[in-house]
Image (spheres, rainbow, N blue to C red):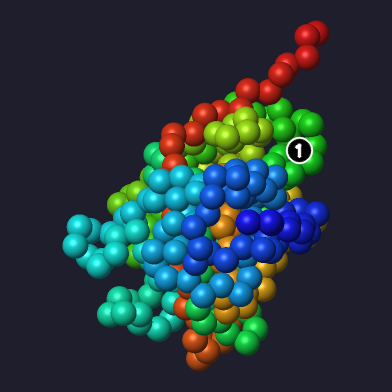
Amino acid sequence: MALEIRALSPAAGAEVAGLDLREPIDDATRHALVAAWHAHYVLVIRDQDISIDDQRRFVSCFGELQPTRSRPGQRANPDILYVANVPIEGEIGELPEGDMQFHADQCYYETPTKGAVLYAQEVPASGGNTLFCNTGRAYETLPPELRARIDDLDVLFAYDYQKNAYHRPTTTLPDGPRAVHPAVIAHPATGLPKLFVNRLMTDSLVGLPRAESDALLQRLFDHMERPEMIYEHVWRPGDVVIWDNLAVAHARTDFDPAERRRLRRMAIRGTRLAAFKPRRTAA
């Protein structure tokens, strides 16, 4: 397949043309896709009409499929989650309406997902856009003293979708899933530093008093959510979007809940994260 790759914004995102995901993907094309993914963090393939198996084949180019965290037997296809405000094939959609703050999928587990793919089947006339924040750029553009302050810190992520899937809770959730990760991770594929905090699911910076942690996190959130860090994807039916969950945080804009929105999601299995170790200049 002859691919054309066009950057969509300075922050992140590229559109891939010349790809029909109903067809098998050869090794050369797969390598080109993975290279483009590592370069742009978000890939957009327009005007697709794909089956579940087509989507699985595409996702497998980037890694092993990650089943959803549902109970055994709860879903007919355990690797599929519908982000939708309508029932699909007898299954209830997840996250049906409203805006969502920036987050990284499953960062509150020991092994966050490597990435995810959404296939847009129905979208509202406006709104419901996905914002992608370049967390590498966010780290690199921090003031040097702030980078030095967070380089050796860890972050506690804690969340419970059953209680509030949209906005950060004001108190720690004692019964929700939780995990600790470095505040600055080394990307598993490239080794590059990525700021690994997000407004929705970050509870605190480990070892700091709550007030100090909250103030420092607010500075980080405000910095990484600046417009120059973000690519905003406006969905069209037939869009297939894959993003690197460790290189971008993502959020959703609000939309009219009376309009139908249906996207089919699959995720890529991740691994434990390692801290980025900056090179120290000798005194």
- Residue most toward the bottom? 258
- Percent x, y for residue 270? 44, 42
- Percent x, y for residue 174? 33, 50
Say which of 85 and 195 sits in front: 85
Give the residue at x 49% y 86%. Answer: 260
Give the residue at x 33% y 77%. Answer: 92
Per the image, label 1 sits on a secondary structure element best described as helix
Say which of 73 and 274 sits in front: 73
Where on the picture, by quarter, is residue 109?
top left
Give the residue at x 58% y 63%. Answer: 241
Say which of 31 and 148 sits in front: 31
Evaluate whether residue 190 shows in this view: yes
- Percent x, y for residue 124? 58, 85
Evaluate whether residue 184 shows in this view: no
Seen in the picture, residue 205 relative to 71 is either above or below; the reply is: above
Seen in the picture, residue 175 relative to 100 is either above or below; the reply is: above
Looking at the image, residue 2 sits to the left or right of residue 172; the answer is right
Looking at the image, residue 216 sits to the left or right of residue 103; the answer is right
Q: Quadrant of the N terminus?
A: bottom right
Q: Quadrant of the C terminus?
A: top right
Q: Amino acid at mark 1?
A: Glu
- Residue most toward the top? 283
Q: Which residue is mark 1?
A: 140
Say which of 62 and 215 sits in front: 62
Give the residue at x 76% y 59%. Answer: 6
Crowd class of label 1 (few under 14; some 14 to 19; many from 20; radius 10 Å): few
- Percent x, y for residue 189? 58, 35
